[in-house]
Image (cartoon, rainbow, N blue to C red):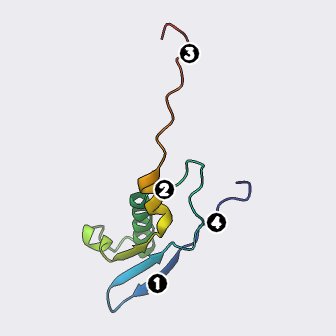
Amino acid sequence: MPDGIPVRATMSVDPDEGLIHIDLTDNIDNLPLGINLTEATVTAACRVAVLTALGPDVPRATGRSSALNLNCGKAARWASRNSPPPPPPPPPACAMC
C-alpha cells in the first residue's frame, strides 16, 4: 500500500457511567497482507493507548480495563476466526540439513 493504511478511531468518555468508548468500525476491511490484527490484539492496543493518555497517576489494574468499551466491528472478529494458516517453513539450505 504505497499511500499507507488509514486507521480511524473515535473515542468518547461517559463520566456518569465511568466508561470510555472507542469505536473502530470506520476502518477498511482486512487486507491479504498478513498485517490484520485479532480482536485480542486490538483490545490490548486500545487499552495501552488509553492508559498512556490518562497518565502515570492512573493505576494499571484490571479494573481500569473494564471501563473500556471497545467496538472493533466485523474485521477484527473475522480475522480472529478466519486467519489463514501460517506458511510452511522454507526448505533447508542443503540436502544434509
Q: Which residue is mark 4?
A: 6
- Amino acid type of disc 1? Ser
User: Which residue type carries mark 2?
Assistant: Leu
Depth check, mark 3 against mark 1: the one in front is 3
The image quadrant of residue 8 is bottom right
Mark toward the start of the polypeptide (4 vs 2): 4
Q: Secondary structure at mark 1?
A: strand
Within 10 angstroms of label 2, few (less than 14), some, or many (20 or more) residues?
some
Residue 12, disc: 1
Determine which residue is flagged by label 2: 37
Real-space Cα distance between discs 4 and 2?
A: 14 Å
Give the residue type at disc 4: Pro
Q: Which residue is mark 3?
A: 93
Q: With respect to residue 11, does 34 lie above or below?
A: above
Distance from label 4 to label 3 (Cα)? 39 Å
Nearer to me, 44 or 57: 44
| Earlier residue among tags 3 and 1 | 1
Residue at x 52% of width, y 17% of height: 92
The correct choice, above or below, for 32 with respect to 22 in the image is above
Q: Which of the two discs, 2 and 1, sits closer to the camera? A: 2
Q: In the current view of this chain or complex, which residue is farthest to the right?
A: 2
- Are the residues flagged by discs 2 and 1 in contact, CB closer than 8 Å? no
Q: Residue at x 32, y 85 (%)?
A: 18
Sequence-wise first label, 2 or 3? 2
Q: Earlier in the sequence, mark 2 or mark 1?
A: 1
